[in-house]
Image (tube, helix red, strand yellow):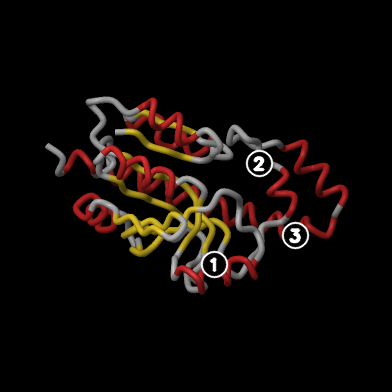
Amino acid sequence: MIVVVGLAFEAKIVADAGMRVICSGDGRNLAASLTRAIDAECGGLLSFGVAGGLDPSLEPGTCVVASEILSGLVRIPTDIEWSHKLASTIPDAVCGTIVGVPTPVAHTDAKRALRARTGALAVDMESHIVAEIGAAHGLPVAAIRVITDPAARALPKAALAAMRPNGTTDILAMVRQVMRQPRELPALMRTALDARAARATLVRGRRLLGPGLGLADFAT
């Protein structure tokens, strides 16, 4: 199995699960990297990590298991058995559409518009690429995404400034942005608490799913 994440801390969570992990960072090279990584022994592709909330009812830390992944105008269904295993194992997980985009959806107005246009529960920058590559290779695809910034909250500029292209966090850039706009500090602290809740859910989900992350339970 190949697990695709966007951020370095997500890669650390699954690193000990015996899977090949690709950290896409800003996603520019993900399609090529994922295509090169697929070989005859690859049993499936999993998109794993945090996501922005589009459904206003979803709080930070809520796990969304994709029933389908929206890439542009194309809706790609996830593997039914695998997704059912994920949803039934992770407490309080919800199932629905995840939409993929090339850049962060940071503002609440943009989130509302995307929700109205797609009906998606959550948005991320990797799942659509994973779904496209999986469909092209005839591989099972699933997605576990946990809400970090809910629909009603915007991502502060300091949080965006801290995102390096390789998926790591640039603390210095974040501090510089806060110094330029000190009023952002409360929002940044709120974002950190949201991220902590999301990380806790990801860690718990990986632990409950075990080394095979759900795929090994039926892919024999």
* Residue 63 visible in the picture: no
Q: Residues within 10 Å of mark 2 (few under 14, many from 20)?
A: some
Q: Secondary structure at mark 2?
A: loop
The residue singled out by tag 2 in the image is 163
The residue singled out by tag 1 in the image is 114
**Quadrant holding the N terminus:** top left
> Which amino acid lies under the numbered mark 3 shown in the image of this protein?
Pro
Percent across and percent down for residue 132 are 37, 45
Q: Nearer the viewer, residue 175 or 120?
A: 120
Q: Locate residue 34 relative to residue 147 in the image: left or right.
A: left
CB atoms of marks 3 and 2 within 8 Å: no
Most distant residue in the left direction: 220
> Which amino acid lies under the numbered mark 1 shown in the image of this protein?
Leu
Task: Compute the Cα span from label 3 to label 1.
Answer: 26 Å
Residue located at (35% from left, 42% from top): 46
Task: Compute the Cα span from label 3 to label 2.
Answer: 19 Å
Residue located at (43% from left, 44% from top): 129
Between disc 1 and disc 2, the foreground one is 1
Q: Nearer the viewer, residue 113 or 121?
A: 113
Percent across and percent down for residue 107 are 66, 63
Q: Secondary structure at mark 3?
A: helix
The residue singled out by tag 3 in the image is 186
**Closer to the N terminus: mark 3 or mark 2?**
2
> Which amino acid lies under the numbered mark 2 shown in the image of this protein?
Met
